[in-house]
């Protein structure tokens, strides 16, 4: 069985959860019997050196079965790639490869219309779409977080979307909704890594019977890090992308509140990159805080900025902290950082909505606080530092997170259970 996995960006060009999971699946399928996987990951202006004159699809770094789709001029208003040569190259690629399954892990940088194009080129293939956020529903980066007041959005509508992005009239979002749903009709099976997400898509109008739940899995191959018997558990780690929705600013505001109250017996270690993808306002706030921290005497610093990290460094950085903080200000669909923390035996302190609320059991394997509330986070950090036995109790309650093998088997089940296109679909 030939399986083509399509994702937005290669994880070695741009870090991100959806592309990491797509690549983990690709690697895992290579070890499966009777399966030949292929990967088509996009590149765009963020990786200009990948572009070759006249090329549309190229190999990637000499690796077998890994290819780059050289996306250009992507139209984020309509979620489509307007280049006819790119569409022709994609169609030729499918025709040459003839996969039995085409598994999209995103449509951005390709286009929602590539679902329909795939069906036209491969009328008998199974087409799968894994939703890693709400990009089909929400034109505001798929986060379903209102730009008007920062609140979580539970329902998209032409007027509500216009309020978030007023440069386009409500009618634009009405037509965009039809555009998306039309192209999604060719999908044979949808998957999501969290159950609450399926409810959102069902409310939007997709058939919940076409969804299957498959949790994300990482090949961390980690064992909990040996811990000393020291009394204090006052070192906290932030891991992830330094963009608005990840909520680092909430954590830094919590630090400021604790300092103002005279509580300073703690350390925050910040691990991550991609600050250049943040909005100017948020980036300025974070950079100003970190710059002010740098000029303090070492004995007065509560925040340490460690910068970007790669997979091989994760164990060492996890060993430096007792807790992992996930202060995200959006739904945070699955949150791979939670899996990484649990793999190394670290309890999680997380926002109380979406994926973290679905995964973390408050008081059993972690602590939850009110999303976006720096005061609530500050109080939780103080509790974590001062309550005797809390860390030990929560660490003992951690269940090992899903691994890559579990995820791969989940998707193999999806491929097997997805029906072949019916004759009516083939006729269309």
Image (cartoon, grey):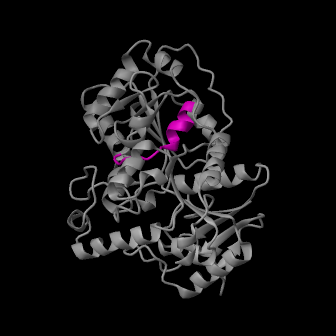
Give how far across and how far down residue 285 sits, in percent. 32, 52
The answer, for residue 297, to whether it is visible in the render is: no
Give how far across and how far down residue 37 sits, in percent. 72, 59
Instruction: Please give left or right for residue 174 compared with residue 422 in the image.
Output: left
- Point 70% across, 67% down: residue: 99
In the image, residue 26 lies in the stretch drawn in magenta:
no
- Point 33% across, 57% down: residue: 204
User: What is the magenta range?
Assistant: 329-342
Give how far across and how far down residue 230 sits, in percent. 52, 14
Report how many numbered discs are placed on residues in the image: 0
Query: For residue 342, what is the image quadrant?
Result: top right
Instruction: Please give left or right for residue 281 compared with residue 415 in the image.
Output: left
Looking at this view, is 14 or 165 the one in front?
Answer: 165
Q: Quadrant of the N terminus?
A: bottom right
In the image, residue 333 lies in the stretch drawn in magenta:
yes
Looking at this view, is 383 or 414 the one in front?
Answer: 414
Query: 266 above or below 338?
Result: above
Query: 159 above or below 364?
Result: below
Instruction: Please give left or right for residue 124 compared with residue 372 in the image.
Output: right
Looking at this view, is 50 or 157 the one in front?
Answer: 157
């Amino acid at each position: 069985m030939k399986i083509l996995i399509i994702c937005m960006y290669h994880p070695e060009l741009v870090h991100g959860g959806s592309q990491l999971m797509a690549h983990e699946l690709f690697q895992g399928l290579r070890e499966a019997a009777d399966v030949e996987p292929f990967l088509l990951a996009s590149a765009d202006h963020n990786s200009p050196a990948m572009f070759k004159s006249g090329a549309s699809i190229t190999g990637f770094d000499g690796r077998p079965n890994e290819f780059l789709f050289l996306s250009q001029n992507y139209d984020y208003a309509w979620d489509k790639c307007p280049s006819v040569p790119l569409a022709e190259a994609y169609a030729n690629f499918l025709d040459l490869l003839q996969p039995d399954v085409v598994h999209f892990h995103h449509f951005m940088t390709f286009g929602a219309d590539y679902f329909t194009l795939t069906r036209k080129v491969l009328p008998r293939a199974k087409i799968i779409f894994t939703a890693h956020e709400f990009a089909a529903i929400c034109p505001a980066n798929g986060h379903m977080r209102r730009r008007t007041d920062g609140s979580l959005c539970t329902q998209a509508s032409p007027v509500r979307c216009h309020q978030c992005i007023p440069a386009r009239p409500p009618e634009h979002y009405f037509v965009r909704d039809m555009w998306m749903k039309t192209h999604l009709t060719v999908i044979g099976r949808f998957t999501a890594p969290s159950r609450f997400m399926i409810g959102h898509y069902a409310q939007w109008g997709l058939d919940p019977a076409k969804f299957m739940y498959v949790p994300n899995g990482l090949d961390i191959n980690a064992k909990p890090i040996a811990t000393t018997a020291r009394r204090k558990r006052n070192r906290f780690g932030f891991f992830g992308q330094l963009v608005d929705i990840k909520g680092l600013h909430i954590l830094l505001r919590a630090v400021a509140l604790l300092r103002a109250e005279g509580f300073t017996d703690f350390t925050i270690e910040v691990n991550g990159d991609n600050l250049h993808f943040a909005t100017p306002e948020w980036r300025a706030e974070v950079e100003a805080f970190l710059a002010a921290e740098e000029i303090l005497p070492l004995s007065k610093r509560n925040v340490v900025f460690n910068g970007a990290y790669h997979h091989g460094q994760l164990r060492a950085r996890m060993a430096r902290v007792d807790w992992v903080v996930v202060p995200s200000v959006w739904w945070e669909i699955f949150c791979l950082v939670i899996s990484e923390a649990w793999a190394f035996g670290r309890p999680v302190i997380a926002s109380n909505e979406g994926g973290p609320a679905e995964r973390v059991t408050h008081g059993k394997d972690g602590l939850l606080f009110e999303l976006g509330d720096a005061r609530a986070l500050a109080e939780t950090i103080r509790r974590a530092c001062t309550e005797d036995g809390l860390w030990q109790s929560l660490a003992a309650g951690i269940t090992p997170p899903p691994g890559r093998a579990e995820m791969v088997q989940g998707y193999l089940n999806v491929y097997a259970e997805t029906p072949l296109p019916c004759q009516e679909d083939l006729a269309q």
